[in-house]
Image (spheres, helix red, strand yellow):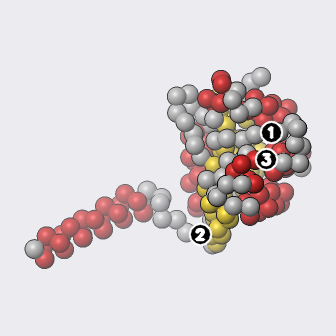
Amino acid sequence: MKKIVSISILCFSFIFNFFLVEQGYALPAQDVRLINNRDYFKVVNQLIEEAESSISVIMFSVYYYLKHPESYSNILIRSLIEAKKRGVDVCVILEKDFLEKDSKGIREVASRLADSGVKVFWDQEGVTTHCKLLIIDSNITIIGSMNWSYSALAKNNEASVVIESEAVAEAYKKYFDDVKVKEFIK
């Protein structure tokens, strides 16, 4: 019985190390910060405002509220546009299914961003991209449950992390490039 348990542990250890660690799931990080609920807006907006070279965003659900210009999601969208104006390479991937239904006003968001020079892409057709991911300056990754909507940013319980790590940012940038499919055209 001890041999079976020992062999099982060795096999599990091998599988864990080979398939998870070797495939990039255990990556070094200089810092990991938790940002929950209302802290998300303040932290993420500041990171966008401080970005120097690049911002890549995948956002499942993002709203632009015409009647509420100072909503948090509007401010985040404007911060992306301002980053682009100061020379930051800004690229956004949105959920294509929302375009066809236009149930989330995604066309308004995509148009505002694209009109400002932000590169806007769609995800793969028939695949729901439920990600909420930002990669800033090839060193900072923000990932979690936060959509850019009034409910998410102002009311919901949401959990995200800010990871300072070139290795994590690089791994997610590869993922980002795999997800983007077709550039937004009006």
| x then y, percent, for residue 167 | 58, 61
Q: Gap between marks 3 and 2, in whole Å?
A: 28 Å
Residue corresponding to mark 1: 64
What label sits on residue 29 in the rendered view?
2
What label sits on residue 125 in the rendered view?
none
Tell me if 118 is positioned left or right of 160 in this view. right
Check contact, mark 3 vs mark 1: CB within 8 A.
Answer: yes
Q: Dot 1: within a 10 Å radius of its alpha carbon, few (fewer than 14), some, or many (20 or more) residues?
A: many
At horizontal 83% and vertical 45% (from top left) the residue drawn is 74
Q: Quadrant of residue 49?
A: bottom right
Check contact, mark 1 vs mark 2: CB within 8 A.
Answer: no
Residue at disc 1, secondary structure = loop
Q: Nearer the viewer, mark 3 or mark 2?
A: 3
Q: Residue furthest left?
A: 1
What label sits on residue 73 in the rendered view?
3
The earlier-in-sequence mark between 3 and 1 is 1
The earlier-in-sequence mark between 1 and 2 is 2
